[in-house]
Amino acid sequence: MPEKIYITGLGAISAIGDSVNENLQSLLAARSGISHLEFLNSAHKNEFPIGEIKKSDADFYQLLGIPSTAKINRTTLLGMQAVKEALASSNAPIDAFKTALISSTTVGGMTQTEKYFYDFDHDLSLSSWIDKLDCGDSTRDIANYINHSGFLTTISTACSSAANAIILGANLIKMGIVDRAICGGTDALSKFTINGFNSLMLLERDLCKPFDVDRKGLNLGEGAGFIVIESERIYNPSRKKAYAQLLGFANTNDAFHQTAANPDGQGAYSAMAKTLAMANIEPSKISYINCHGTGTPNNDESESKGMHRLFGDNVPMYSSTKPFTGHTLAAAGGLEAVFSILAIQNNTVWPNLNSKNFIPEFPFKPVTELKTEQNIQYVLSNSFGFGGNNSSLLFGRNHD
């Protein structure tokens, strides 16, 4: 019998909350965190709605108890907050078991290096920030913050990064390399990211509306989401009852285009189908799909085709939570894993905000109002990245 993977810890920070509970309350209230920039000095600050966390870096230094003289970039600060919460909620210290830390990011230390780019040549005191640019440095700083000296690694596969971190953590457990993994992702907003997505003409000038026929693009966001997963070798419900189980997962690549998904939906379909096959779960058993749902014309059509191919006309309840948080890039799969687990815990389906007129080619539409008192047993969470890197995770209710 395949070894069970239990989720015992959750940590989240986003534009809708500084903790898992604050994120939950915003989801229940259908309260979006999309607004205009206050802390990032972008030329587009009044042009594009964005899911910014309304705290300065100095606020995070104080919140995390970090000396003001330390050099920690914003991406890492967000990751520290979410990892700290996830580890605390798992009710076991970092050295209690053989543990891996697997963090993911695309921005890394760019938030600081872009700020000082023009000053590096004549101010040598700033050169230490260059060492912080690397994505792996963020993981090392998070590890040092929680006093972790075991296995750690960093994943950067664009918007599927955090989902792939969870997949790697599960595989390490299944292979017996570790007993527990803290895995997820973190990304902060940067001018480079905003300018880059703007150059690709992927940003929405209004609130994003996934799966709407008039969708024009995405709203960016920042945040971090991590979960703690444990093997059944060490899982003990008397220490901490699991929030859910990770039943299946898959990563595929359609290799269609550098930034666009294959419009025929093959990537989305194969990731979801392989995930269900691993779990030996029939499509009809799925209660809810937390979609990638960015609000771009290409993504939403491709993901809809993938769902239609897998589920036929009987697509389960589905929605995108990106209108709450914005698209948090590498953190998206981690945050949305937390949201998927909260859906199981609360028997609730989160609404697909802002969308009214749906893609007419499909005989189904997303859930647009909060649905409570549902029997949520199995939730699929999709994360699709640039280059056609597609990942799906299947979470199930814990019955142990």
Image (spheres, helix red, strand yellow):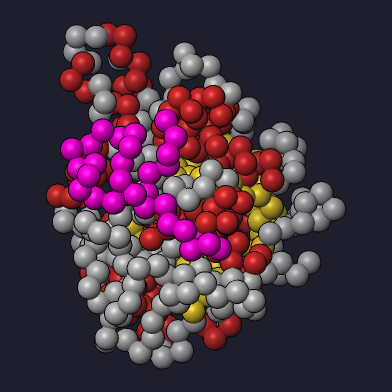
Q: Quadrant of the N terminus?
A: bottom right
Percent x, y of residue 143: 56, 31
Residue 393 horizontal/vertical position (percent): 51, 64
Tell me if 155 is positioned left or right of 45 in this view. Answer: right
Q: Main secondary structure of the magenta part?
A: loop
- In this orientation, which residue lies closer to the viewer: 181 or 127? 127
Q: Residue furthest right?
A: 238
* Relative height, residue 258 to residue 13 (above, below): below
**Residue lying at 20% horizontally and 48% vertically, measured from the top left:** 47
Tally of numbered discs: 0
Residue drawn at x 72%, y 58% as measured from the top left: 242
Q: Position of residue 271 (x, y in %)?
A: 42, 69
Tell me: residue 134, above or below residue 116.
below
In front of the other: 376 or 399: 376
Q: Is residue 268 one of those drawn in magenta?
A: no
Residue located at (85% from left, 53% from top): 238
Q: Is residue 58 above or below residue 304?
A: above
- Location of the C terminus (image quadrant): bottom right
The reply to whether residue 295 is in sight is: yes
The residue range painted magenta reads 27-56
Q: Is residue 164 visible?
A: no
Front position in the image: 202 or 207: 207
Question: Splitting the image into 4 quarters, where does residue 86 fall?
Answer: top right
Is 46 one of the magenta-colored residues? yes
Image x and y of residue 304, in percent: 34, 77
Task: Give the side of residue 13 with respect to residue 211, left or right.
Answer: right
Q: Is residue 288 above or below residue 44?
A: below
The residue at the point 31 percent across, 9 percent down is 125
